Amino acid sequence: MFRSINVLPGFDLWPGALDPEAQADLLRLVQAAFEAAPPACYETAYGKAMSVAMSSFGSLGWTSDKAGYRYADRHPGTGQPWPAMPQALLDLWAALADPETPPDSALINLYRGDARMGLHQDRDEADPRFPVLSISLGDTAVFRIGGTSRKDPTRSLKLSSGDVCRLSGPARLAFHGVDRILPGSSGLIPGGGRINITLRRAASA
Ligand SMILES: O=C(O)CCC(=O)C(=O)O
Ligand SMILES: [Fe+2]
């Protein structure tokens, strides 16, 4: 499980880190989270709704509205705390990201149809010394990653169900995004599509 490929300095990929059984277990946890904390396509400060629907596990969840991006301790629709962080995600983070400081946020991204995510940096966390650990489930994504300047050259790679990747060190603030999802590339998610979970330490430790 713990064999990685160093794709770029600070960007590591563990292909197939989660076996089919672990993927199905995680999908069930996500489905339960979606019941309690329904995924929503948030609006951005630019007034446009994102094509990716989002929810979260953990004490903090990433949200967005006209006022901008932020971490919130409650689901904006239900007003309830986010579903608890599953033990399997805590264990994965301890093994591949940081054995000492647990993650306090797991953003769940749901890509259906032609949902995509534009090139961006993850910079709403208090301390970028903690990595971002990303898990892919369901249909394959065409993922793009470049450098810390928007103008830097980018490369693209496919992320398949069960793959885990990590942005840390020199790649922690690298621009990245998802160009598209390859429909029908996995049978894991009923109705198709892709789920991505990003584990983070959002508050300072
Ligand atoms: O879906 C992905 O693979 C990337 C998600 C992402 O970049 C994010 O949630 O910040
Ligand atoms: Fe990101």
Image (cartoon, rainbow, N blue to C red):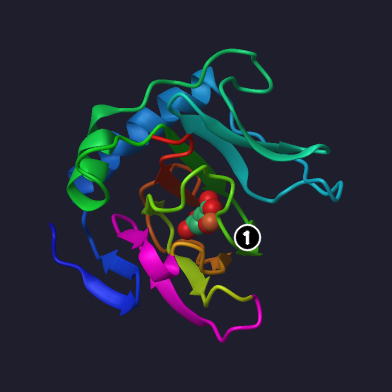
Range covered by the magenta-colored residues: 150-171
Is residue 79 in sight in this rendering?
yes
Q: Quadrant of residue 151?
A: bottom right
Answer few, some or many: residues within 10 Å of disc 1's Cα (few below 14, many 20 plus, some between 14 and 19): many
Outermost residue, right direction? 47
Is residue 5 found inside the magenta-colored segment of the image?
no
Tell me the residue at 46%/61% (across/down): 184
Q: Is residue 67 above or below residue 146?
A: above
Tell me the residue at 68%/20% (across/down): 77
Q: Is residue 58 above or below residue 186?
A: above
The residue that label 1 is drawn on is: 116
Closer to us: 126 or 159: 126
Tell me the residue at 43%/47% (across/down): 198
Tell me the residue at 37%/53% (across/down): 131
Picture coordinates of residue 115, whole percent (x, y): 64, 56
Q: Amino acid at mark 1?
A: Arg
Picture coordinates of residue 30, whole percent (x, y): 41, 32
Picture coordinates of residue 120, whole percent (x, y): 62, 63
Disc 1 secondary structure class? loop
